[in-house]
Amino acid sequence: MSKINYYTQEGLKKLKDEIEHLEKVERPKLSALIGAAIDLGDLSENAEYHAAKESQGLMEARISKLKNELSIARLIDDSKLDTSKALILSTVKIKNVKNGMEMEYTLVAGNEADLKLRKISIDSPIGKGLLGKSVGDIAPVETPNGTIEFEIIAISR
């Protein structure tokens, strides 16, 4: 059985857009480069041709990988999620019990994690620690430097 990848509407659109860009923009560019390199003559010593063919192979592998991801992608319907607990797509405000520092993260699938956007994977140590917790709960998180405890302050969508 194949692994299922869960996506938000935004993440699924981003995946589809990347596939479309590679197929409709990048693929024709590489084909043109290969054609131009062939026109240069002797292919056995044509560095431009070999570089373009290698780039084409890498791009086709990337397209194939993305299409495979798309084939096992499932859209998460956040309207049906329980808001009383920290689940995937929950925005969770937490406070470090030891130093009082507050942070807010949205829990997402690993393929959409982006720390700059404050989106953390449910498979990360913090994500795993927060999953299933309710407001007021203390979530112990295992880190290389020991356990850090976070208090759940708020959960929203």
Image (cartoon, rainbow, N blue to C red):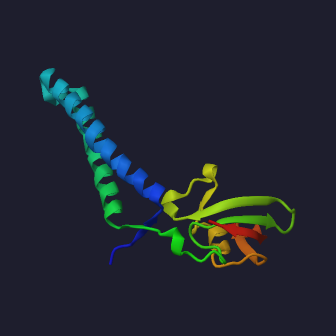
Which residue occupies the extreme top position in the image? 40
Q: Is residue 140 above or below residue 108?
A: below
Position of the N terminus by quadrant: bottom left
Q: Is residue 72 above or below residue 62?
A: below
Which residue occupies the extreme right position in the image? 99
Q: Give how far across and how far down residue 84 sits, in percent.
A: 66, 78
Of 33 and 16, nearer the camera is 16
Asked whether residue 60 appears in the rendered view, the answer is yes
Q: Give how far across and how far down residue 62 sits, in percent.
A: 33, 50
Question: Left or right of 60: which side holds 99?
Answer: right
Determine the residue positioned at 60% across, 66% down.
Answer: 124
Question: Left or right of 85: which side holds 108?
Answer: left
Question: Left or right of 110: which side holds 154?
Answer: right
Position of the C terminus by quadrant: bottom right
Q: Is residue 31 above or below residue 116?
A: above
Question: Left or right of 69: which side holds 138?
Answer: right
Determine the residue positioned at 60% across, 73% down.
Answer: 87
